[in-house]
Image (cartoon, rainbow, N blue to C red):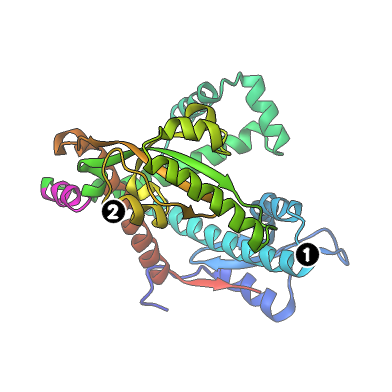
Amino acid sequence: MKNKRFECSIYCIIYAFLFVTFGFPLIAKAEGAEVVDRIVAVVNDDIITLFELNRSFEPYAEKVRALGYQIDKERKMLFKVREDMLSRLIDQKIKDQEIKRFNITISEKEIDQTIERIKEANFYTDEDLRAALANDGLTMEEYREQIKEQILRTKLVNLEIKSKIVITEDDIKFYYENHQDKYGGKKKYHLRNIIMKVSPFADEKEKLGIKTNMDAILDKLNEGQSFETLAMTYSESSLAAEGGDLGLFGLDELSLQLQDTIKEMKTGEFTPVLDTDQGYQIFFIQEIVNMPGKSLEEVLPKIEKILYNEILEKKFLSWLEDLRKQSVIKIIK
């Protein structure tokens, strides 16, 4: 225990001991009254009470209950949400202890400015904000305290993690070269289709009849008749009036069946009759467009942001895990 970065205070140890041994409550209304609060976790020199846990847990619990699951499933989900919420509160206590250790502070002006930005972003007047808070069961003072905690934790993350992230030009270049599917030139297919739908209740005779009709349309195409005209005449699509015009698609946006069929085809060619989930279809490649790729200079800021967020997430989780390992944490059931 003494190798840990923190040691639990006598106050925490006494209360934890009294609760575990005798069921001693943290707060009681009066002699003989029911327990209204107790300790649910000890985190170094701090405690988490049942009241804190319930206050954070209840809004999520209401959402779970509103989903209308069966009792067993609802109970399991509520248990999982409660566990997750306790874990989150433990992380918050650890971060708050780090804030004290680094003596990170915040002014009332910073809180005021943050609240003003929130009001502007939501087009709230002061009265609107107070009404919204009241609807969530919060006073302005409680809300200011929440904002204060959020800003302090953000400052901690900035100090401990963000300020230490370095992204080099080589990192950006490596990402760019390994994601040419995003930034390189891309081939797109301008497609039209003719479709005859098949009911999921259709028997084999009905399906055969629809397939025969589609084969007859395919014969007309092979004879040189206009795909657009045949689509307007026979297609059962909402786009039939536009000659079955589906628009432009990258190969990766299409089903695997269609990808395999058209990837070697050329402009002006059409597929055989395909049996698809939607029905029997014939696709026509009206045009193949080679979209230009983006240069490294064009996407550099975007890639830098992607890499920054990826590194930030990994470092944050690693940092938090290290803090947990260095801390004395006791969960009291």
Quick check: is 176 in the magenta stretch?
A: yes
Task: Find residue 318 and report its horizontal and vertical position in percent.
Answer: 34, 63
> Which residues fall within the magenta stretch?
170-179
Q: Can residue 108 be seen from the camera position used here?
A: no
Q: Earlier in the sequence, mark 2 or mark 1?
A: 1
Which residue sits furthest left? Answer: 170
> Does 190 appear above or below 3?
above
The part of the image, by quadrant, that contains residue 17 is bottom right
Q: Nearer the viewer, residue 138 or 165?
A: 165
Mark 2 neighbour class, 10 Å CA radius: few under 14, some 14 to 19, many 20 or more: some
Identify whether 320 is placed above or below 10.
Answer: above
Q: How many marks?
A: 2
Q: Which residue is mark 2?
A: 311
Q: Which residue matches tag 1?
A: 70
Characterize the magenta stretch by its predominant secondary structure.
Answer: helix
Front residue of 187/213: it is: 213
The magenta stretch spans residue 191: no
x 57%, y 33%: residue: 238
Amino acid at circle 1 = Gln
Quadrant location, the N terminus: bottom left
Residue 224 placement (x, y as % from top left) = 36, 37
Residue 69 seen from this side = yes
Q: Considering the numbered disc 2 on the image, is that residue within a helix, a strand or a loop?
A: helix
- Which residue is at a point 78% across and 64% down the rendered structure image? 70
Q: Which-is-in-front pick, marks 2 and 1?
A: 1
10 Å crowding of disc 1: few (<14), some (14-19), many (20+): few
Q: Is residue 34 left or right of residue 313?
A: right
The quadrant in which residue 294 appears is top left
